[in-house]
Image (cartoon, grey):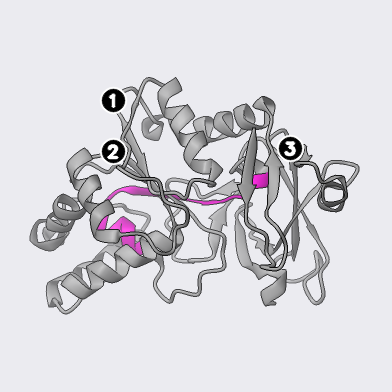
Amino acid sequence: MQIIRSNDHDDQKPLGVVLTHKNLLSAISSYNVHPPNNHKITSKDRLMHSFAIDNVLGYVLQALTTYLGGSIAFEDKISHNDFNLDVETILFSIKELKPTIYSSGAPFLKQVQKLIANKYGNSFIFQRGIDRKNRYHLEGRLVSDCMYDMLVFRDIRQKMFGGHVRMLYMDDDGTDNNKVNLGSFYRAVLGSQLIKTFSRTETSSGITATVVYDYMPEKKLVGPPLPAMEIKLVNYNEFTAEDLPNPRGEIHVRGNNVFVGYWNNIEASMDAIHPDGWFNTNMVGEVLPNGSFLLLGSKNSL
């Protein structure tokens, strides 16, 4: 399989990422075993996503859903990026198709969050409801049937998301400087579980993913490594593994889901993959005592 991705530098040509069946099956298996049993995808679920055509996570979730007997809902047209989508049209499709599992990148979900804020943000009940839900999250509770759900949030779920979403997968590369914590916002509005993923095309979409019951109000949190993935931190500038209270550094990953190389580009492949299998994500992170990672930013931005 050849997947085209965009480089970090605009003056370079896109590189083709070669993914094998082993890579993809490893990623699919990881996302299958990651959630607890009562939150796994089942034959009763319907998946819909708004990923760009080159985002591997969309293909991995589709393969997992069909393997488990679920169905896939498709939009009328395929997008090429997550930044300039027709939000109203996509939301209309979601409302009509009524997915139970929805997945998208942070850029699109940020656009939807702004749309919701413009329509409901001036309402005292909406703001009070967001605050109350955030307090529930700090208590480790995900509530979907409180007074504010009946007054405002159920209306949003029905009119924008079809009213059936029970799980939201949000792919986040940690580069979004949005002041709103999208994870907490969508848990509050949808009353559904949210799994935030940190992925790369070169890792077949899988590196880390947040835990279902972890409602930590930290927007940089991307969870522990997925089952197939090893992660190490390499010292980078002032970020070191000896930092206190938590180790920090450049995130390097290794596992069966790491790609075999770039299409027809041996030099780039050798630069990206260390001889012992480690791939440099070019992201700097911090590991918490519970094994979860925080993304501090890309090397180019720090």
Q: Are marks 2 and 1 in contact (CB under 8 Å)?
A: yes
Q: Residue at x 69, y 29 (%)?
A: 20
Q: Which residue is mark 1?
A: 44
Q: Nearer the viewer, residue 204 or 128?
A: 204
Q: Is residue 127 magenta?
A: no
Mark toward the start of the polypeptide (2 vs 1): 1
**Amino acid carrying mark 2 in the image:** Thr
**Amino acid carrying mark 1 in the image:** Lys
On the question of residue 220 being in view, the answer is: yes
* Numbered range of the magenta stretch: 184-202
Mark toward the start of the polypeptide (2 vs 3): 2
Q: Which residue is mark 3?
A: 255
Location of residue 6 in the rendering, given as x and y in whole percent from the top left corner: 63, 57
Q: Which residue is mark 2?
A: 100
Q: Would you place residue 142 above or below residue 297 in this image?
A: above
Q: Would you place residue 234 above or below residue 274 in this image?
A: below
Q: Is residue 192 magenta?
A: yes
Query: SS for tag 1?
Result: loop
Name the outermost residue toward the left. Answer: 151
Query: SS for tag 2?
Result: loop
